[in-house]
Image: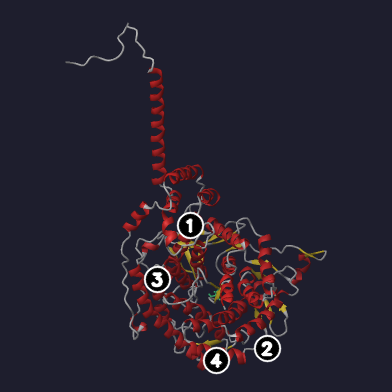
Amino acid sequence: MPAKPLGRRRGTKRRVSANEPFRNLMLMLLGIAACLTIGIILAATFFFNGDADTDTSLRHKVQALPHLLRGPNAGIAVPSIESLRRDAGHDDHGVLHDTGAHGDKSDALLLALEQKNQRHDPLTENAPHHDHQQHLKSYPYALEPVAEDYDIGEEFVARGGSRFLEYVDGTPGPYEITETLRQQSDQVARSRRFHVQKAMRFVWGNYVKYAFGKDELKPQSASGSDQWGGQGITLVDSLDTLWLMNLKDEFWQARDWVRDHLDHSTVGSVSVFETTIRDLGGLLAAFDWSKDRVFLDKAVDLGDRLLRAFDGATTGIPWGEVNLASGNRKNIGWSGDNAIVAEFGTVQIENRYLSKLTADDKYAKKTERVYEILDEISYPDGLYPYYLRNDPRNKGKFLRDGVTIRPEFSNDKLTFGAMADSLYEYFLKTWLQGGRKEPLYRAMYDKSIQGMHDQLLQTSTPSKLTYIADKNRNSGTMDHKMDHLVCFMGGLLALGAYTDPLGLDSTRAQRDLQTAKALTYTCYQMYARMNTGISAEYVQFYAGRDFQIGRGAPHYLLRPEAVESFFILHQLTGDPVYREWGWEVFQAIEKYCKTPYGYGALNNVADVNGKPRDSMESFFLAETLKYLYLLQDPDTEVDVLHKHVFNTEAHPLRIFPVIDQESTEQ
Ligand code: DMJ
């Protein structure tokens, strides 16, 4: 039987029950609620699975929290939902190259996150993170110990830049870094560090034999030279390398020379910057590790002589050169009497350490004042042109009725390479040295890194290599080159990310970490793509061709910046790939730069038959060999996150809270 049709029959009056209006109202409300719920679910699905990098990044923030609380970052501030909201507003510029505002979308996402967090504890909700972990692959690169009689000169062949492509954009690696992998990597590293130590023993032995106490060893002609005014620069610069490589007999022999022969009262005019970072930094680090008073006494004497560079400097910016014997000062001739930001902005760590150890704040005060002046005259983008007018002939310009007025920049070139590089490095490191308590320095660092991302960061074609270009601020013209010197930025950005007051998982820190890794990969490519496996002084980027050796810059001066970043990134992330890259670089240096008595700069990194020059800068022993060794030394006491700050010449000094703690323990 067909069912009776329901509903009103035409012409008949419908009977209405007493409950019906209420029931209809309820049904309507239920319908609206259902629509709203579906809408919210759809919106949330879109935001959580959408294409925006920011969304992924914010989701990642919540998912990664448990890992952060347990892992090597335990103790690092966990971002609150308020800080996430703040990030998504002013600080959120997305990941690499995405500087657009995310506005409403981010707000909606944060709202969704807040609602989610009310129902689920973000500190325990990490299922998607587990998913990611499950998709991680095994580390595919062979980890084989190196025999002690392995002949690098015979065996090493540069293998080009076609490997490790998965590291190009700096996103989290596809490989699982397990405890077993770390242990394997440590074992292999110990067999490699033997070879780096052997290189140091070789070059140091020849320095002692042919140039002991001289500024430099000439590695082809087995003689010494004194082009740094006769301060034993190589010896002093090498002290902590000897200590950290456990070459203690050599260290104490060098200490005796410092005690008996190092006499700054006979040294003439020197660069304030170079002498501070190499000589003063070397003495301070030697003291910091050995606690031998000889080093501190010599450092105080040198520090007092260098401090005269501030005498009569009406701008508060020191003179570029000072005569250690007479105290006479002058500007640097070759820079057209301009003061260079990377010079006067890179003397703070050494002078602050001196103040800390002597309880005399004169060193710290004068050099910290430089940062206040820089902050006062800074541009909104936090980037500094590299020349400042500091000319005595323009003295009147800086004085008005006896009051010092603001100094002025005298060019508009923006770079993270030569002449500006370590200024930015010291903003962050000065803050770290003081125990992260002086917000001005961190703010100056963060501002400049934002400016760098907004204005200078580029991606090459076709390989999508990340690089930091130079720029003329006034004309806006970009120069698509990158100095090898810029390669320190990978390590610095990573250090900044791991110590970011917003937390490592903040959008800003994640952006900086990604840039750090991507940039470091580019620096690795600058080595790997050369015939010798060694980088040129700078490379030039061209559309469609990635980079080529810069015009007039095919040489390699034994510089450390790339291996410095490998070391720092390895200490922070534990990814063994940085050890692979460092080992490759070491072998290339061993094969192409080694001479009968040391290691020499190369004229042309494209020429596998070239003869190294008869010159070896002290930073090869102070920095390049030290970083290469520490990278392969799992047993080192050096700890860049909790204990030490490296000055720009790779001299590790304890940070102030550690000094304080250790002095109360004694
Ligand atoms: C070193 O003297 C320092 O690292 C400095 O900050 C820049 N360049 C050299 C090494 O390349």
Secondary structure under tag 3 reads helix
Does residue 488 appear to the left or right of 575 in the view shown?
right
Circle 3 residues within 10 Å: few <14, some 14–19, many ≥20: many
Q: Pick out the residue farthest to the top.
A: 11
* Disc nearer the start of the sequence (4/3): 4
Q: Does the residue labelled 1 lie within 8 Å of ligand 1?
A: no
Q: Do the residues labelled 3 and 1 touch (CB within 8 Å)?
A: no
Q: Quadrant of residue 138?
A: bottom left
Q: Distance between the residues labelled 2 and 4?
A: 18 Å
Secondary structure under tag 4 reads loop
Q: Which mark is residue 266?
A: 2
Amino acid type, label 3: Ala
Circle 1 residues within 10 Å: few <14, some 14–19, many ≥20: many
Label 1 sits on residue: 511
Q: Which mark is residue 212?
A: 4
Label 3 sits on residue: 528
* Disc nearer the start of the sequence (3/1): 1
Q: How far apart are marks 2 and 1 (CA)?
A: 50 Å
Circle 4 residues within 10 Å: few <14, some 14–19, many ≥20: many
| Picture coordinates of residue 380, whole percent (x, y) | 62, 55
Amino acid type, label 2: Thr
Amino acid type, label 4: Phe
